[in-house]
Image (cartoon, grey):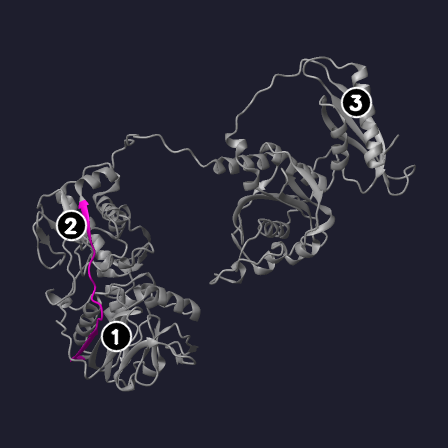
Amino acid sequence: MKVLLSWIRDFVDVPGTPEEVGRRMSLRGLALEGLEPAPPGSGLPPGRIDERADAVMDFDVTANRPDCLSVLGIAREVACAFDLPLTVPGPGASGWLTTPDLAASDGKALPVTIEEPDLCARYSAAVASVTVGPSPAWMQTRLHALGVRPINNIVDITNYVLLELGQPMHAFDFVRLAGPAIVIRRARGGESVKTLDGKVRALASDMLAIADAERVAAIGGVMGGAESEVTAATTTIVLEAAWFNPVSVRATSRRLALRTEASYRFERGADVTATIRALARACALIELIGAGARHRTVVDAYPRPYQPATLSLSRAQIQALLGMDVPSTDVERILRALGFGIRVLGGWHAAAPEVPLPVGVLGDNWRVEVPAWRLDIRRPVDLIEEVGRHHGFEHLPSTFPGVEQAPPPSDPRVERDARVRRALLGMGFSEAISFSFVERAAASPFIDREPALELANPLSEKFTTMRPSLIPGLVDAVSHNRRHARRDIRLFEVGTRFTPRGEERAAAVAWTGLATADHWSGGRRDVDFFDLKGVVEQLCAVMRATASFAPVEADYLVEGRAAEVWMNGERVGVLGLLDPIVAEARDVPPGDLIYVGEVNLDALGVDAVHGVKAAESLPRHPSVVRDISILVDDTLSADTVRGTIRAAAPLTLMSIREFDRYQGQGVPDGKVSLSLRLVFQALDRTLTDDEVREAMHAVAAALTKDLGAVQR
């Protein structure tokens, strides 16, 4: 929020330079993001003289503080931070901040009907006779400084009040309103309106319309209509100040792709009690600059008047949460300066800043009335935050609070995910973090015959679908790296994927390029299926899980170079070569081979994190190694061969490893020569040659009988 320091000083006479003010406010939670020189020319209203340094101050206002989207809101914070009185425009203010005391009329001259009180809780209007022309130089200077283009004196006054008080306003040409009447209703089917930017916009039935007796005159909370706008020929205007439902305004603004200063404030929540104050300020400015005079016609449609919330607060609560003692006088001063009503020891301290109140009424318990503009205050802890913020968090004692109970154990899934990350980093992969939302086209190959989870209101076409797999994000990351001249890429991600069954934690990898780092000694080789299979096996080993693999057909993998991962009779993952069609659809260069894999971490469990860690002594007796070479059908999987050997061998078989595979001259078609190394070892004795020979005979017989193998 940009604001002139001289404009702030209209309400609070704060000393110091812009830098000093910004430094103090940054400590009080209103961070100063930038300082700009004040525009040339005097931005001071009539009767005000101030030769102190001026600047445009840009404060960072968080989304939960719409009250600070105005000069007055920031001035209130400044007054509290510097412990200075705040002057608010009103009938009791002096000088040019004085406003008339508007009283609602019978409304016969301008009937106002609210058909949708849930979308428009209050609608106030005032009529004035005007002469349209340019606004004075000081007003134009202030508007320019805050990034608003001056148009004419009437429009400039509505923008001025919006910036000063935070209440959006609009001016209608009274003569161009049919009726004249104002009806706040939902748009009807087929209705459209030409807005002030010159575009004709079709309205949906859930949008709020400000209509006259015949047509739509404005889009509630977003923008006025061109048919009733103020022109040079306008002589009578209707000033509007209203409260519109934030959800409705946000939905309308987004659907129409129309964002304005008014919608920006209504979306975050406006002050429902500010409408009459804003009208009074606008009428006072019209008369101050000689642009016209107000009528007695003031309408205030207010079906359900605002009932302020009250919260209980005690000094003990403040000390327990902040860990420091804040004097009662400071608590009262801070809350009163911020506009809260305080009841202590049975008496009310009004928040009206024009009524001077004594400071120092002692008490340790309060009932606090929340002003309508503080939408972020809902619980006593919110009040404590306000007290701590303006008392100064820099005064918090640097001591640790006492520990009254042992902290709860951490979620084992957190350590599990961390272990997976460490394992993949150790295998040479780099971690990627992608969005949970992906394009519909990117998600479709991975849906696996289940309905896609699509967002009702996506931010863009690139974020329409909840990702069913982590692989689409990794493929896009590989594509990005390849377009930036990176050839050898190893990426992984640990995250959540979404299916109609719910959320699942998964780990996915993508690998393209060389299998090992390029080196002058040679040995260059591109990654293949077995490299990726080794990564998955190692990952399962880290999680103390034994995995088996079986061929699989998947829409996004190349047939014959794909496998699914099984553990304890449950499918827990898949790996293989990404289909080139899927890869090229994500702008991967043609010819690139990308191997991808994904494992369901929830299926692997958390035993590896909190399971019992057992240690075993090293073997004391020697092992015996035997090799066997066989001819088998080339359609048999290695897992089948190993399973047959383990079933036939005694418990002394420690490991099986394939060390050679050959097809070619001397091997019949459809056959493959496999050489396997078997390691036998007993923990309690040295194995004899007869024991090992008997085991090898049993293995050879089983291979011949079950698989039709021929020993070579």
Disc 3 marks a residue whose amino acid type is Ala
- The answer to whether residue 511 is seen in the rendering is no
Dot 3 lies on which element? helix
Disc 1 marks a residue whose amino acid type is Glu
Q: Which residue is mark 2?
A: 367
* Mark nearer the N terminus (2 vs 3): 2
**Residue 283 shown left or right of residue 488 in the figure:** left
**Residue 208 shown left or right of residue 74 in the figure:** right
Q: Residues within 10 Å of mark 1 (few under 14, many from 20)?
A: many
- The answer to whether residue 208 is seen in the rendering is yes
Q: Which residue is mark 3?
A: 695
- Mark 2 and mark 3: span between their CA atoms? 87 Å
Q: Residues within 10 Å of mark 3 (few under 14, many from 20)?
A: many
Quadrant for the N terminus in the image:
bottom left
Quadrant for the C terminus in the image:
top right
Q: Nearer the viewer, mark 2 or mark 1?
A: 2
The residues colored magenta run: 293-313
**As drawn, 611 above or below 413:** above
What's the residue at 67%, 40% (across, down)?
532
- Mark 3 and mark 1: span between their CA atoms? 96 Å
- Mark 2 and mark 1: span between their CA atoms? 35 Å
Q: Which residue is mark 1?
A: 240
The percent position of residue 639, horizontal first and vertical second, equals: 74, 36
- Magenta span: helix, strand or loop, mainly? strand
